[in-house]
Amino acid sequence: MPRTPSPSRCFSLALPAALALITFVSPLAAQQPEDDRKHTLKGPSVPVETQHTLGSTTMSGEFIPVEGRPELAAFALVTNDPNDLASARDLENKRIFDLTVFLVDEIDAVREITDANQAGNETQAVVLLAQLRKRYEPDLPRDPLAPELEQMLDADQITEFQRIINDYWLRWAAAESGSMNLTPNSRTYKKTEHKLNNQLFHQDIGEAYESSLKRYRNTIDAITTAVQPTKAQQDQIREMIIEHIKQTRLKSTAEQRLDLMTDIYHLFDEDQQETFFRFMTSLAIDRNG
């Protein structure tokens, strides 16, 4: 009967796959390739005759909001300076980077939110997200990038920039609330604006999560599928990875990643260890084949 490889031999062979399975790198490197990462500052196509408004309306009267942050789309309508547009993209990337670092600091809260979502407790997840945002942006800014964007504009451009944004938020809130006679000072507007403001923050959080922490979730899922660990083992693996994130802050060394995988290996019984070894080896073969 073939002998099961020793742990040290196992992980010497499986290291390439371990590093492929858990690409624990810095948040910026973990994001999409450069061309994909620097998003084009535009929403849906805007006809020439209405190019100084944001959002669009379908033939049936449905309002379609822009993709991404409205202040970035508004900025692209008031300036076509390539250097300023590049700086705006950098601001967008910096916000996602800062949110990624924030999520690492708040990894326990992220775990609570994930648990609430998986349990189908949407109300609790929304409350936890609201608390998370309050810790990140206590004043809950509607247009968090606007102050820095305005520094690149002259006085006339700032006036137009603010007009575009305010008009957009009013029309979006009106469409969302179903009240087409909405005024900026009305209670309905303020309530709807707050809801949409939080919605945009959730989108930013989602992008930060996708660009960094989702890989950890994928790691747990891959190990679970391959090895079929017990519920207790799954909980231990999750705690190990969360502790790893806290300690390395997305900047782990190859040795730290290998230590993590070795610790996970030692959670398993002999049959599971062999399965885990075969799984990791197959990944190495597929990767280097």
Image: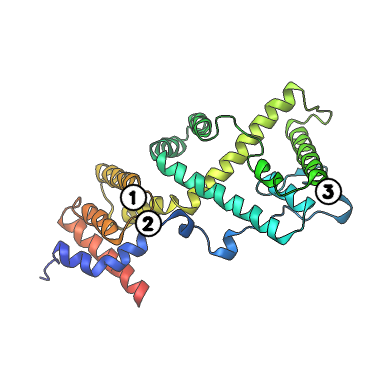
**Disc 2 and disc 1 in contact, CB within 8 angstroms:** yes
Q: Residue at x 18, y 53 (%)?
A: 266
Identify the amino acid type marked 3.
Answer: His
For label 1, the residue is 248
Q: Measured along the vertical axis of the image, is residue 56 above or below residue 253?
A: above
Q: How is the image coloured?
A: rainbow
Task: Please provide percent x and percent y for residue 153.
Answer: 75, 48
Of all residues shown, which one is farthest toward the right? 49
Q: Residue at x 35, y 75 (%)?
A: 288
**Disc 2 and disc 3 in contact, CB within 8 angstroms:** no
Q: Is residue 39 at all visible to an observer of this figure?
A: yes
| Crowd around label 3: few <14 · some 14–19 · many ≥20 (10 Å) | some
Direction from residue 257 to residue 188 in the image, left or right? right
For label 3, the residue is 52
Q: Measured along the vertical axis of the image, is residue 277 above or below residue 149?
A: below
For label 2, the residue is 24
Label whose residue precedes the other's in the sequence (3 or 1): 3
**Disc 3 and disc 1 in contact, CB within 8 angstroms:** no
Identify the amino acid type marked 2.
Answer: Phe
What label sits on residue 38 in the rendered view?
A: none
Task: Please provide percent x and percent y for residue 231.
Answer: 28, 43
Q: CA distance from mark 2 to mark 1?
A: 9 Å
Which mark is nearer the camera, 2 or 1? 1
Direction from residue 201 to residue 42 in the image, left or right? right
